[in-house]
Image (spheres, grey):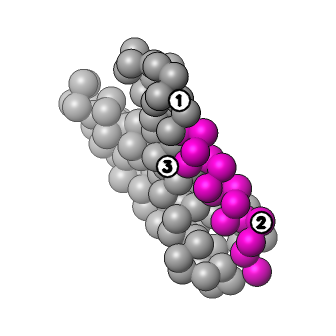
Amino acid sequence: MAWLYLIAAGLFEISGVTLINKLHRDHSKTAFTGMILGFGLSFIFLALAMETLPMGTAYAVWTGIGASGGAVLGMIWYGERKNLFRISCIFIIIAAVAGLKLISE
């Protein structure tokens, strides 16, 4: 169950980061509220995951999901630059997260 909490935390982290970008573009109350909600839920689910998982693993996986997800959404939704090196780096992050899952208790 802890890994599901951690995945949810990472997904909410992605939503929070995406809504920061939207907030800078639109300056809307909806984006601000969504950003606060996204980050709040992210921290709640991260805390739940850390009841079982080691802190280092949970934090690394959480940031990996957030960083890679934010980068991918930036490329898809906001026209950020796509190139082989950037995409390769995202895959390295994902591989590292998968590796942490495989070696975790």
Q: Look at mark 1 in the image and give the residue it sits on.
A: 87
Q: Earlier in the sequence, mark 3 or mark 1?
A: 3
Say which element carries label 1.
helix
Residue 48, can we see it?
A: no
**Type of the residue with mark 2:** Leu
Residue 103, by quadrant, is bottom right
* Closer mark to the observer between disc 3 and disc 1: 1
Residue 86, can we see it?
A: yes
**39 or 70, which is in the foreground?**
70
On residue 102, which mark appears? 2
Can you name the residue that lies furthest to the top here?
79
Could you classify mark 3 by the number of other residues whose Cα lies within 10 Å: few (under 14), some (14-19), or many (20 or more)?
A: many
Could you classify mark 2 by the number of other residues whose Cα lies within 10 Å: few (under 14), some (14-19), or many (20 or more)?
A: few
Could you classify mark 1 by the number of other residues whose Cα lies within 10 Å: few (under 14), some (14-19), or many (20 or more)?
A: some
What is the x, y in percent for residue 100? Answer: 67, 65
**Type of the residue with mark 3:** Gly
Which secondary structure is most common in the magenta stretch? helix
Q: Residue at x 77, y 65 (%)?
A: 102
Q: CA distance from mark 2 to mark 3?
A: 19 Å
Q: Residue at x 72, y 75 (%)?
A: 104
Say which element carries label 3.
helix
Q: Residue at x 33, y 30 (%)?
A: 22
What is the x, y in percent for residue 21? Answer: 31, 33
- Magenta part of the protein: which range? 90-105
Q: Look at mark 3 in the image and give the residue it sits on.
A: 66
